[in-house]
Amino acid sequence: MQHSQAFQTHNHNTCINSAIVKAQHLCEQQNVRFTPIRQRVLELVWANHAPILAYDILKELRLEKANAEAPTVYRALEFLLDNGLIHKIESLNAYMGCNHPEQAHVSQFLICTVCQQVAELDNPKIKQVIEQQALKTGFEISEQTIEIKGVCPQCQA
């Protein structure tokens, strides 16, 4: 499932390759290292277009390299988050790829409560409304993560 096309199917390999190329380019621009382990974790995050737990990433890495450790996975995930290459779905404690890492944005996530698939929205109007309402109350926003739960079209069928 590709989250930018809200619950539609497509070729995962194309997206994985695109995510890697974008990541390489962004890391080059920001003068940060896109190490092989960071790349592999990003590939695993993008593998199914579904949120993935850090534990599942570690399990996959251990199939390839028996001595893979949790801190390595968490450091790679932190790097990918810090550089806008992935998102964390807080309510699922899971990670998913970001379609537009080259653009700073606040996403909204539609989470299917049946299959756990997630679709990413990027609607700046939602962000603006929240910021305006927060400003009216004197609330200072440090971070926005909006997660909307419901049932996707496939699970409704």
Image (cartoon, helix red, strand yellow):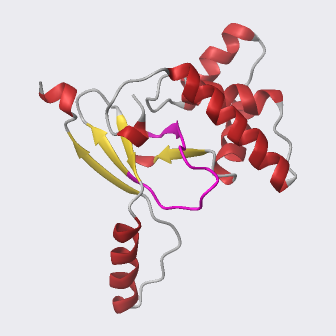
Relative to 64, residue 119 above or below = below
Question: Which residue in the rendered view is the most extreme toward the left?
Answer: 157
Q: Which residues are magenta?
A: 93-108
Residue 62 lies, in percent from the top left, at: 69, 13
Q: Is residue 136 above or below residue 124?
A: below
* Residue found at x 51% / y 37%: 96
**How far across and down, in percent of the image, does residue 7 sit?**
31, 33
Q: Is residue 100 magenta?
A: yes
> Does residue 123 belong to the magenta stretch?
no
Give me the residue at 73% from left, 34% from top.
71
Q: Is residue 66 above or below residue 44?
A: above
Q: Tag count in the figure?
A: 0
Residue 42 occupies which quadrant of the picture? top right
Q: Residue at x 48, y 20 (%)?
A: 11
Q: Nearer the viewer, residue 87 or 142?
A: 87
Q: Looking at the picture, tell me which residue is in the foreground, 120 or 13.
A: 13
What residue sits 25% from the left and 45% below the top? 149
**Relative image position of residue 98 (x, y in whole percent):** 54, 44
Q: Main secondary structure of the magenta part?
A: loop
Image quarter (top left, top right, bottom left or bottom right) of the C terminus: top left
Q: Based on the displayed image, in which of its 4 quarters is residue 97 positioned?
A: top right
Image location (x, y in percent) of residue 1: 39, 28
* Rendering quarter of residue 112: top left
Q: Can you say whether 53 is above or below 128 in the image? A: above
